[in-house]
Amino acid sequence: MKQVFFIIVFFLLLPLFNQASAASGDSSGVIKTILWYEGHTGVLIKQTGMSDLGKCGRADYYILDDHHPFFQEIYSLLLAAHMASQPLSLHLDGCVQGISRIKHVTSNK
């Protein structure tokens, strides 16, 4: 009976272990695409020179999760930089829906 209990607990906690093993990194470049796509919990960003820095399995988009505490401010900065073709530095940390999560944004000129 104890073995069954431990197996169930292990499978319930497994997603937490996967989240904890997520990586982080920095990406710099011009924003090429800003995409709102039904089913995602935030805005998808395509940038020049992308890679899977969050180790989430995808390198085609980054995501700014709509639960980010500075979502509005970062989204405004992404839009302005996109319109001006201004490069941005994105710090990515972890995964949201299998996509590297944008944690911080830096604009340098």
Image (cartoon, rainbow, N blue to C red):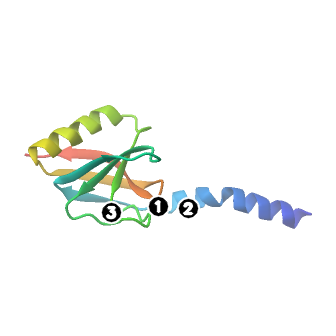
Number of other residues with Cα within 10 Å of mark 3, as a class: few under 14, some 14 to 19, many 20 or more? some
Q: Residue shown at 10%/48% (left/top)?
A: 85
Q: Nearer the viewer, mark 2 or mark 3?
A: 3
Quadrant housing residue 106: top left
- Between 99 and 53, the residue placed more toward the observer is 99
Q: Residues within 10 Å of mark 1 (few under 14, many from 20)?
A: some
In the displayed image of the protein, which residue is found farthest to the left? 109
- Whether residues under marks 2 and 1 lie with C-beta atoms below 8 angstroms apart, the answer is yes
- The amino acid type, in three-letter code, at marker 3 is Asp
Which numbered disc, 1 or 3, marks the residue that appears first in the sequence? Answer: 1
Residue 17 occupies quadrant = bottom right
Q: Quadrant of the N terminus?
A: bottom right
- Which residue is located at x 76 percent, y 58 percent? 9
Q: Position of residue 21 (x, y in %)?
A: 50, 63
CA separation, marks 2 and 1?
7 Å
Per the model, the C-alpha gap separating discs 2 and 3 is 20 Å
Q: Secondary structure at mark 1?
A: loop
Where 52 falls versus 78 (above or below)? below
Label tally: 3
The type of residue carrying mark 1 is: Ala
Marks 1 and 3 close (CB-CB < 8 Å): no
Q: Which residue is mark 1?
A: 22
The residue at which mark 3 appears reads as 60
Where disc 2 sits, the SS reads helix
